[in-house]
Image (cartoon, helix red, strand yellow):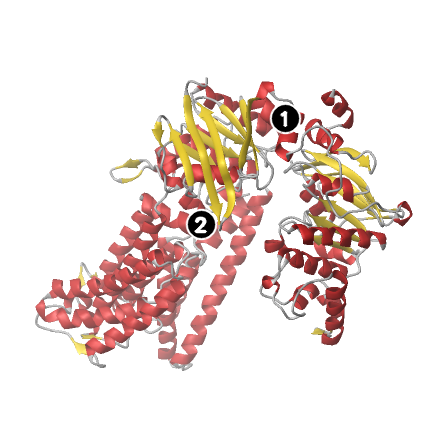
Amino acid sequence: MDTDILLSMTGIDKRFAGIPALSAASFTVARGEVHALIGQNGAGKSTLIKVLTGYHRRDAGEVTFDGKPFEVASPQQAQANGISTIYQEINLVPYRSLTENICLGREKRRFGLLDWASMHREAENLLQRFNIRADVRRPLMEFNTATQQMVAIARAIGFSAKLVIMDEPTSSLDEREVGVLFNVIRQLKQDGVSVVFVSHKLDELYAVCDRVTIMRDGRTIRTARMDAIEKIELVSSMLGRSIEKTEGHATAFTARDEKNIGKVLLSADNLAVGQIVQDVSFTIRSGEIAGFAGLLGAGRTETARLVFGIDRLKAGAMTYGDKTFEPRRPSDAIAAGMGFCTEDRKSEGIVPDMSVAENMMLALMPKLAKSGVIDEKAQQEIVKRFIKQLGIKCSGPDQKVRELSGGNQQKVLLGRWLAMNPRLLILDEPTRGIDVGAKGEIQSLIKSLADQGLAVLMISSELEEVIEGADRVFVLRDGISVAEFGRAAATEDALMGAMAHGNAPAVAEALV
Amino acid sequence: MTRTRWISLLGRYGVVVALLLLVLFGWLRYDYFLGFFNISSVLRYNSMFALVALGMCFVIMTGGIDLSVGSTAALGSVVAALFSPQGVWIGLGAGVGAGLCVGLVNAALVTRLKIMPFIATLATMLAASGTALLLADNQSVSVSYDSGFTSIGQDNSFGFPIPAWIALAAYIAGWIILNFTSTGRGVLAVGGNEDATRMMGLPVGRIKFLVYFASGGLAGLAGVILASQFGAGQPIEGVGWELFAIAAVVVGGTLLTGGVGSVGATLAGVLLLGILFNVLNFENGKGWISLSAYWQSVIRGLFLLIVVVLQAKLAARGNAAVRDH
């Protein structure tokens, strides 16, 4: 197989504003091969793909495709040269018909005008390969996500690509649809088309891929045949951990006193919504830090969204402080005394051009306002108290949040929720994108909040953070809570094992 | 499903229904409403707006806006009047050419310099208006009556005003382009999701360039008709035309955010607004009430609002029903 190379990328460098996103990354795909590309967030997978498809220009390195040097300046050119990409966020036009979404860019013409009849027929035929029968004249937005995904794939195949890149194509598909997709991938393979398959669901990789390339920190860590690599090795290579134990303390979390932990505040049983959360159960006690660990796409954030009422439960139940809890919208959760610091501070959290004070008061506004007028004095007092308590480094309450560092922005967000006097605080990746010093401060802050009786649900992709920070760790895998570890049992090996295999006992075998 | 289908159809073609109802109302209430003279004068006058609205419709479908069309028409009318002694075709060509020049500037500003369409065309609106006033020396420029230039706007052909035929031809061409060419489908795709369209490999820049260019040309053509119809280039005409055009496009169910639109419904929108004006004039003529031009504006505004709100409600109900199934 290796003698017939379709794509070879070597020594690829790419920097954004001086910060390396790719350093000497390499990637090879053989003809008719299904090649998995995996890595954690920020590992450089997307950048590598975007460099290949001409979305980004590489700073250094060589790309050969189909035996020739490959230089493209845009996704259009890449597509014209035989590389089609199906992006994770479906890149189609919702108002337009299925036919248009499949055929735009290579329309069929008769007498110089569009030949709708034959375009509709072609769209139907392409979709039929996925066992989808749909009225191709209807706008895309009337169909469910799975169909939209298939339309995107049909489009790529319609372009008679030599290489199809699928960026997490299964994240919105159910089992049956995944099966259909795998059949299509195998069919493509038979036709000699290569597929690059980006996914975080390890089982899927074993089901359909021939080889895997693992990336971390902008580098290519390893390429191996799927049948020659264990799941646990995949996980540890992705996370950059050797399977042997690492000693020492990597975070500012310190041991906690058991007596600070009270009785169960929130208990969630068999939560489910769509494909991404299938069966998640956990409990959080007041004064406890509960950690969610798992690979990307395991359903951690989505579970938190359910708790906070952003998405509605499809199945399962929650009790909160002895009562059934059915939040319909975030304001229900806030009224019940919950706060949620989102993973994506920029788009979901802070309002960059508003001041520290305004940002902190956003959630509290309805409470502070007396018949619509905000009590300025009460506001100033609260803001000053939190700036001091959280150690926010700013010139004053009126400084714009945009001008603060990531760590201080995070503290402003924390302040926003703490001002509400919450009983439960959900923290999604609380220290992502924050420099080391500030990270420690945030971590000690979380601990001291828990010591004061706050229940904390902490989602983190950094193993040490959950291991050292959480009193109990719940491991999610493909939308299912597969394991629970107390403080003593939560070791790197145990967590990685659960992420890879789904249950704790399997770890022991894997490590033998 | 059939009921929801009806609702969504009504939402889509509400403008046609409203137009028919209005015509029915006029026909029953006023003696000469459907008389040859009235029809012909409504068509003659509104054909200018129809041309401007057609260009606007394409621009809006890409998610943009062209505020300069009114000034461009004024400029076109002045330039056409200045060149009218040279003959019909030269006058026509000069007017359209002036419009295309403004369109070219708009297109370049929006696609090359990436300036927001609202700002770019606001600037050219002022510039075109100023140029028209400069060229006309701040007064109307009378056209040549010897060269036959006035026949474009004033004569009939096969019983209907020539401007109406021009507008009809433009709308047929527009309909074919929108529905049967890749550029036309690209216009809707760009408006629906520009990034996705770029990822799909469509020439987004070229598509956007073309719509502004064409909008300029159509506004110039409207200016030619203006000069020819009234016997003079009118540097101060065209004020508010862009708003009339936007109103007609929106009443026709085209989304201001782009991605959804119809050439036919835009024409219906133009006729609806034009005939409403006509009806108000007839009502004044009856002598029962006397509506000043200001009141007419108020009434037109209200009417516009009602149609748009009704359409939005119906479309939303239709869509919600479709999703639930």
Q: How many marks?
A: 2
Q: Is residue A137 visible?
A: no
Tell me: residue A299, above or below residue B290.
above
Residue A364, position as x, y percentages in the image: 73, 64
Which residue is depicted at the point 24% across and 77% down?
A: B133
Kindly indicate whether the residues beneath marks 2 and 1 are on one polypeptide chain.
no
Tag 2 subunit: B
The residue that disc 1 covers is A203
Q: From this view, report whether residue A125 is shown above or below residue B213.
A: above
Q: Residues within 10 Å of mark 2 (few under 14, many from 20)?
A: many
In the picture of the structure, the residue carrying the numbered disc 2 is: B192
- Looking at the image, the residue that sits furthest to the right is A259
Which quadrant is home to the C terminus of chain A? top right
SS category of the residue bearing label 2: helix
Answer above or below: position of A12 versus B228. above
- Could you tell me if the residues under marks 2 and 1 are in contact, i.e. CB atoms within 8 Å? no
> Which disc number belongs to residue B30?
none
Q: Nearer the viewer, mark 2 or mark 1?
A: 1
Which quadrant would residue B60 be assigned to in this image? Answer: bottom left
**Taking A35 as reference, is A383 left or right?**
right
Closer to the camera in the image, A297 or A54: A54
Q: Position of residue A411 (x, y in %)?
A: 70, 58
User: CA gap, disc 2 to disc 1?
Assistant: 36 Å
